[in-house]
Amino acid sequence: MARTICFLVYTDFVLFDLAGPLEAFNTARILSGGEYRLVVASLDGGLVRSSSGLEVMTEALPAGPLDTLIVPGTLAPLDIPRVGEVIGAIAALAGRAGRRTSVCTGAFLLAAAGLLDGRAVTTHWLLAPELQARFPGLRVEGDRIFIRDGDVWTSAGMSAGIDLALALIEADLGAEVARQVARMLVVYFRRPGGQDQFSSLLDLDLGSDRIRRALGFARDHLAGDLSVPRLAEVAGLSPRQFGRAFTAATGTTPAKAVERLRVEAARPMVEDGRRSFDEIARLVGFGDPDRLCQSFIRCLGRTPQDVRRQARSES
């Protein structure tokens, strides 16, 4: 029997949050000879307007068991029309679904439906601090591409929904089918779930001059001591206070943030190709090429050698 994958959409959903995963599952359906049944549903069925104004034809809410429920995101997740009814529908469908998943800010709706309490989750890096503040019972990891916590899967924004779909397909049908889907969609297989979303923390509206000051110091002193005690001293907080305040403001830990800033600084030098990996590692504070390589894999899903080769081929 085909696995039913139900996408629940609502007024002002983000079109790409639906289209990317839907196309991945549809490609897998074709390649596998019909292993999936795809349903795009809404509260009333019929045409539903996306945030871009394009309307999508939907079915009424399905009856019976579901393999997977997928909730796309929106620009203002808790301010959409009929939000209470949408949250109620999510809770009802989730009770019949083997897996409950969200793309981007769809995590806010899953959380409002009570499905994420005590879970490790992610969402778009820009809204991770807000998700954590609104739902303190969650463990929000704002620098992840996607996270699986038991039968709950959440992903970051936009294209990360495709990464999530590929991971779900791999869990269902194996790595080879998921790899074929990635090849058909011309996307990477696979960006690991732990990969950073790679958007500079310095662009965040942090709401805290202390945290911004610490991040600015870190950016300007990448080769120096950027331990929690040192950054806490710059921020004028105790290490414990600093750790809590930093995670609340950025959605990530100080150590992960420093690693990301160092990778952001190293990447242009790696792509430029004029410095050795050993020199780059020293300049940005990694110390040696091995640590540089490990951090590139965590943050970018690629080694420095791969990044340099790609830059050379593109030039």
Image (cartoon, rainbow, N blue to C red):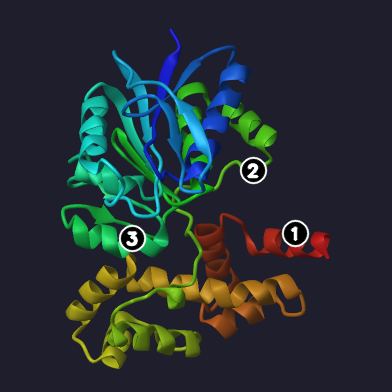
- State how far apart marks 1 and 2 are (Cα): 15 Å
Within the image, what quadrant is residue 96 found in?
Answer: top left
Q: Is residue 143 left or right of residue 300?
A: left
Tell me the mark number nearer the camera, choosing from 1 and 2: 2
Kindly identify the amino acid type of the residue bearing the numbered disc 3. Answer: Ala
Residue appearing at x 52%, y 44% in the figure: 16
Residue appearing at x 60%, y 41% in the figure: 189
Tell me the mark number nearer the camera, choosing from 3 and 2: 3
Marks 3 and 2 in Cβ contact (< 8 Å): no
- Residue 296's x, y, as percent? 56, 63
Q: Is residue 150 left or right of residue 104?
A: left
The answer to whether 165 is drawn above or below residue 310 in the figure is above
Question: Does dot 3 land on a helix, a strand or a loop?
Answer: helix
Kindly identify the amino acid type of the residue bearing the numbered disc 1. Answer: Gln
- Residue 81's x, y, as percent? 30, 44
* Residue behind mark 2: 187
Kindly identify the amino acid type of the residue bearing the numbered disc 2. Answer: Val
Q: Check residue 310 in the rendering and tell me which mark sits there, or answer none.
A: 1
* Residue behind mark 3: 128
The answer to whether 187 is drawn above or below residue 285 in the figure is above
Mark toward the start of the polypeptide (3 vs 2): 3
Q: Nearer the viewer, residue 286 or 200?
A: 200
Within the image, what quadrant is residue 151 found in?
Answer: top left
